């Protein structure tokens, strides 16, 4: 039986513009930022992971 679970990846990267949160959830991808500090980006990463794992809809759909 094929797996119905989507692959989920939420990562933080930094460049000369700031810190970014990049995510992939199944076929969907996105990027949030730039954030001024790595702490801010990590907090957003945690929230984005929670959004995907605990909610059925995107926070922007509400």
Image: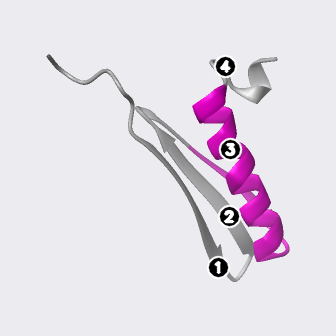
Q: Residue 27: give x, y in percent of width and height.
A: 41, 32
Horizontal arrangement in the rendering, residue 26 relative to residue 14 (left or right): left
Q: Residue 10: give x, y in percent of width and height.
A: 55, 52
Magenta region, mostly helix, strand or loop?
helix
* Quadrant of the frame with the N terminus: top left
Instruction: Determine the residue located farthest toward the bottom in the rendered image.
Output: 16
Q: Residue 55: give x, y in percent of width and height.
A: 67, 24
Q: Earlier in the sequence, mark 1 or mark 2?
A: 1
Residue positioned 64% across, 76% down in the render: 14
Q: Which residue is mark 4?
A: 57
Tell me the distance, in whole angstroms, between the alpha carbons under discs 4 and 2: 22 Å
Q: Which residue is mark 2?
A: 20
Q: Which residue is mark 1?
A: 15
Q: Is residue 62 above or below residue 11?
A: above
Q: Nearer the viewer, mark 2 or mark 3?
A: 3
Q: Which residue is mark 3?
A: 48
Viewer-side residue, 29 vs 8: 8
Within 10 Å of disc 3 (Cα), the crowding (few <14, some 14-19, many 20+) is many
Mark 1 vs 2: CB contact within 8 A: yes
Mark 4 vs 1: CB contact within 8 A: no
Horizontal arrangement in the rendering, residue 48 relative to residue 34 (left or right): left
Secondary structure under badge 4? loop
Tell me the distance, in whole angstroms, between the alpha carbons under discs 2 and 3: 12 Å
């Amino acid at each position: 039986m094929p797996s119905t679970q989507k692959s989920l990846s939420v990562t933080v990267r930094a460049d000369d513009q700031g810190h970014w949160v990049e995510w992939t959830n199944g076929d969907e991808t996105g990027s949030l930022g730039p954030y001024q500090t790595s702490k801010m980006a990590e907090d957003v990463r945690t929230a984005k992971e929670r959004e995907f794992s605990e909610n059925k809809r995107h926070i922007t759909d509400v």
